[in-house]
Amino acid sequence: MNRKIQTLLALLVVASVLLAACAPEAEPTSAPAESTGNGETPTIAPEDPAGQFSPLNVTGDIITAGSSTVFPLSERMSERFRDEGFSGNITVDSIGSGAGLERFCVAGKTDIANASRAIHEDEIASCESIGRTPIEFRVGTDALAIVVSNENDFLTDITMEQLALIFSTAVDWSDVDPSWPNEPIQRYSPGTDSGTYDYFVEEVLGDDATLLQNSVNTQYSEDDNVLVQGVLGSPYAIGYFGYAYYQENAGTLKILNIDGVEPTETTAEDGSYPLARPLFIYSDATIMNEKPQVAAFIHFYLSFVNEEILDVGYFPASQAAFDTNWENFYNALGMANPM
């Protein structure tokens, strides 16, 4: 071979090696996980190589009912489940935690119960009497919102003690604090079937429901939107409901700090906000095995709820809670947890 050609080929080989060494590293094929906002990486769904939990591969009816607080979250997840290919019917009824658990544990008419409180022992017994063993899945965290109208010019922060007086024996605002107006307190509360009501009575009133039931000028409704409109109707009105309903009406409602603590994702998760609470859905192993669409919906719910929950108005549950969720899910199906 001609010496000049040999030299040229050698130079080409050297140049190609140098170019390869200088080339930038390839970009990763997948983006790193983003934080949920509380310092944790989001819960990642276990692999489903057979696609058995895909919304495209199941059909049939899914019936859920319960908490008005959990309702907007379950409604969002059901909409997304349909958008991603589920061709069956999903019913999500907002009837209160107590009524939802009764429909699940006594009537046996639903596949999933939504609850803004943990299930009670007597409800578990009712479930067992009809052959159901409730399985708990924690899907998020709520900061119970104490709200007044934007027209209220004397409240920004209250103590737990003041809140208890406001929703019990006080008649006028001045009965709680002499510097507040000598005007009747107008109270708006979720109904007695609501998990929000149960939680409020337990945390604020020492589990003495008669204090609230005997208060004057108190209106009850299982529909949180009715409560919102009631509070908006007067500068002397006050109400409480899930954070999502405050967020929907933040332009016209004012949320109150409690004991100087603002309700946020951080204060809800670390427990410094006094009225932070977990949100749940409940199902049963027999239902999940006999109705693949229910198991698929719960799998989908747990897999993607952290992508939706902040936008709905609530906060993610901890990674530890989701680890328990996945254990509960696969145990119910008699499967090994692939995580």
Image (tube, rainbow, N blue to C red):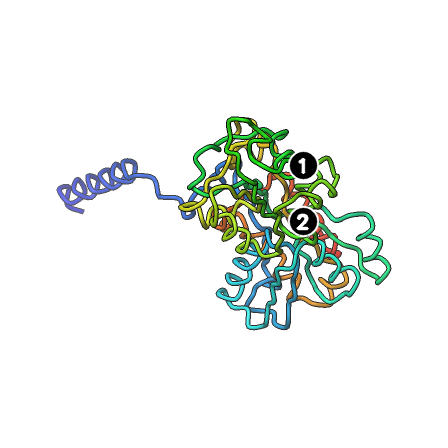
Q: Quadrant of residue 253?
A: top left
The image shows residue 245 at horizontal and vertical percentages of: 51, 49
Per the image, label 1 sits on a secondary structure element best described as loop
Q: In which quarter of the image is residue 130?
A: bottom right
The image shows residue 195 at horizontal and vertical percentages of: 67, 49
Amino acid bearing label 2 = Gly
Q: Tell me the residue at 18%/43% (across/down).
A: 6
Front-lying residue, 320 or 276: 276
Which dot marks residue 331? none
Q: Tell me the residue at 41%/48% (across/down).
A: 29
Q: Tell me the residue at 73%/43% (across/down).
A: 209
Q: Does 69 sit left or right of 26 as displayed?
A: right
How many angstroms separate mark 1 from mark 2 (CA)?
23 Å
The residue carrying mark 1 is 169
| Picture layout, residue 305 above or below residue 183 | below
Q: Does 182 sit left or right of 296 as displayed?
A: left
The residue carrying mark 2 is 195
Q: Does 123 sit left or right of 297 as displayed?
A: right
Amino acid bearing label 1 = Thr
Residue furthest right in the image:
129
Asked whether the beta carbons under mark 1 and mark 2 sit within 8 Å of each other, the answer is no
The image shows residue 259 at horizontal and vertical percentages of: 56, 27
